[in-house]
């Protein structure tokens, strides 16, 4: 299934609208205005809370947790090596995922071993961050979309992001 993640341009918090391939609203991610924890919440189209995105503090490299509604947790960490690329590891209850690709050209993939779970492409010329995401593991749609939002926030920690160290 294909999705489009678009950051809201006129928002005081990091908020995103997520549309399906037909242009219908599928999910939304909303941050809290006065939150010390730099958290966001992912909702489905009906407004049901699916998961929370929380920054993990006291780590050498940026990391975030996805706290799922069922109590499970995913941990997304920026990898140190190789230091000339941006790579991320995603620890899930179902095993380890890797996010690799060319982050400077904004083309990357999420894989579990050799199985492609999602491919991500960033739109170059837009007022706000906008991503096209192809999901190949529908059981993890919400988590994979949230992972893209986390990566966007980590990549922009120096540019007015609520995930930055203010």
Image (tube, rainbow, N blue to C red):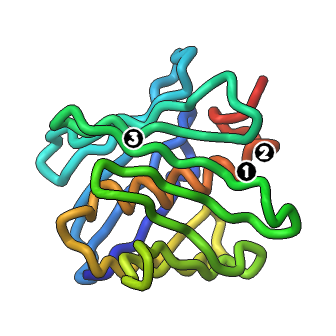
Secondary element at tag 3: strand
Residue contact at pointers 3 and 2, CB within 8 angstroms: no
Q: Mark 3 to mark 2: distance in Å? A: 22 Å
Residue 165 percent coordinates (x, y):
76, 27
Mark with earlier residue (3, 2): 3
Q: Which residue is mark 1?
A: 156
Q: Which residue is mark 2?
A: 159
What residue is rendered at 43% in x and 84% in y?
Answer: 114
In this rendering, would 33 be left or right of 155?
A: left
Secondary element under disc 1, as helix, strand or loop, is loop
Q: Position of residue 125 (x, y in %)?
A: 69, 78
Which sits in the foreground, 128 or 85? 85
Q: Position of residue 22 (x, y in %)?
A: 23, 82
Of residues 104 and 8, the one drawn nearer to the viewer in this rendering: 104
Q: From the image, tell me which residue sits under label 3.
A: 66
Say whether residue 86 is left or right of residue 95. right
> Is residue 166 positioned above or below 29 on the image?
above
Q: In screen coordinates, is 66 left or right of 165?
A: left
Task: Give the CA separation, mark 1 to mark 3.
Answer: 18 Å
Q: Which quadrant: the N terminus?
A: bottom left
Residue 140 image offset from top left, x and y in percent: 25, 62
Give me the C-alpha separation between circle 1 and circle 2.
5 Å
State which tag comes first along the sequence, 1 or 3.
3
Q: Which mark is residue 53?
A: none
Question: Where is 1 relative to 94, above or below?
Answer: below
Query: Along the line of sight, which residue is nearer the eye, 162 or 92?
Result: 92
């Amino acid at each position: 299934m294909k999705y489009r993640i678009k950051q809201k341009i006129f928002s005081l918090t990091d908020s995103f609208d997520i549309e399906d391939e037909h242009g219908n609203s599928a999910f939304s991610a909303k941050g809290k205005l006065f939150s010390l924890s730099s958290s966001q919440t992912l909702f489905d189209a009906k407004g049901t809370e699916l998961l929370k995105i929380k920054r993990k503090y006291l780590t050498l490299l940026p990391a975030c947790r996805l706290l799922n509604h069922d109590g499970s947790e995913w941990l997304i960490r920026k990898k140190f090596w190789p230091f000339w690329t941006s790579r991320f590891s995603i620890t899930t209850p179902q095993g380890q995922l890797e996010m690799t690709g060319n982050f400077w050209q904004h083309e990357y993939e999420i894989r579990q071993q050799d199985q492609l779970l999602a491919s991500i492409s960033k739109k170059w010329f837009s007022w706000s961050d906008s991503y096209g995401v192809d999901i190949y593991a529908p059981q993890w749609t919400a988590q994979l979309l949230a992972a893209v939002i986390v990566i966007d926030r980590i990549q922009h920690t120096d540019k007015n992001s609520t995930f930055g160290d203010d």
